[in-house]
Amino acid sequence: MPALAELEQAWLGARQDPSYRTELELLLRDFAGRPTPLYLARRISERAGRPVYLKREDLNHTGSHKLNNALGQVLLAKRMGKRQDHRRDVGPGSTGVATATVVCAAHMECVVYMGCRTRSASVRTFSA
């Protein structure tokens, strides 16, 4: 498939390019709020008899780890000269939200596709 071959070549080149990694690391730190802090869960620690730390992924911009993947994908798309990022979202929308957030920040276009069953479930989730 030509599109997958093009994507693979772009990724192999980006992976070896220190400027790609540097830009991604800056975005992860300054845009996504990485690294997220660890929180000592005192009451859980007391019950467990040892320290229990929680990684606070909920503090990320858009509230999930999905932003990490979206940042890398959008940087790669820009590197490839792509101006539009299409995403089919199979979850309750958080992947689409993260992708749309990053694409908007990169001044690109984004179309998020969501299936009927997923959309119905998301409406119930967001309505609750």
Image (cartoon, helix red, strand yellow):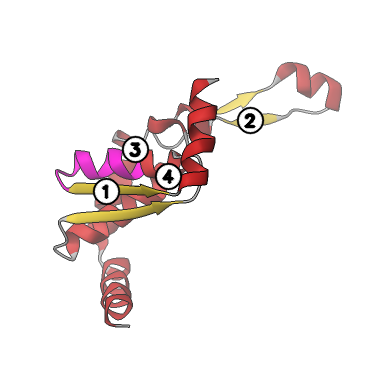
Taking the image as drawn, is residue 37 in sight?
Answer: no
> Mark 4 against mark 1, which lies toward the viewer?
1
Residue 14 is left or right of residue 83, and the answer is right
Vertical position of residue 122 compared to residue 127: above or below: below
In primary-sequence order, the first of circles 4 and 2 is 2
Q: Find residue 18 and report its image quarter.
A: bottom left
Kindly state the secondary structure of the residue where label 4 is placed. Answer: helix
Tell me where residue 106 appears, x and y as whole percent.
18, 44
In primary-sequence order, the first of circles 2 and 1 is 2
Q: Give the extent of the magenta segment.
A: 98-108
Tell me where residue 65 appears, x and y as whole percent.
47, 41
Provide the residue designation for mark 3: 29
Q: Who's the residue at 50% across and 44% down the image? A: 118
Provide the residue designation for mark 2: 54
Q: What quarter of the picture does the N terminus occupy?
A: bottom left
In primary-sequence order, the first of circles 2 and 3 is 3
Q: Rate crowding at label 2 as few (under 14), some (14 to 19) or many (20 or more) other CA atoms within 10 Å.
A: few
Provide the residue designation for mark 4: 95
CA gap between label 4 and label 1 equals 12 Å
Vertical position of residue 81 compared to residue 27: above or below: below
**Which dot marks residue 111?**
1
Q: Amino acid at mark 1?
A: Val
In primary-sequence order, the first of circles 1 and 3 is 3
Asked if the residues shown at circle 4 and circle 2 are in contact, with their CB atoms under 8 angstroms apart, the answer is no
Asked whether 65 falls inside the magenta stretch, the response is no
Q: Who's the residue at 27% across and 53% down the image? A: 74
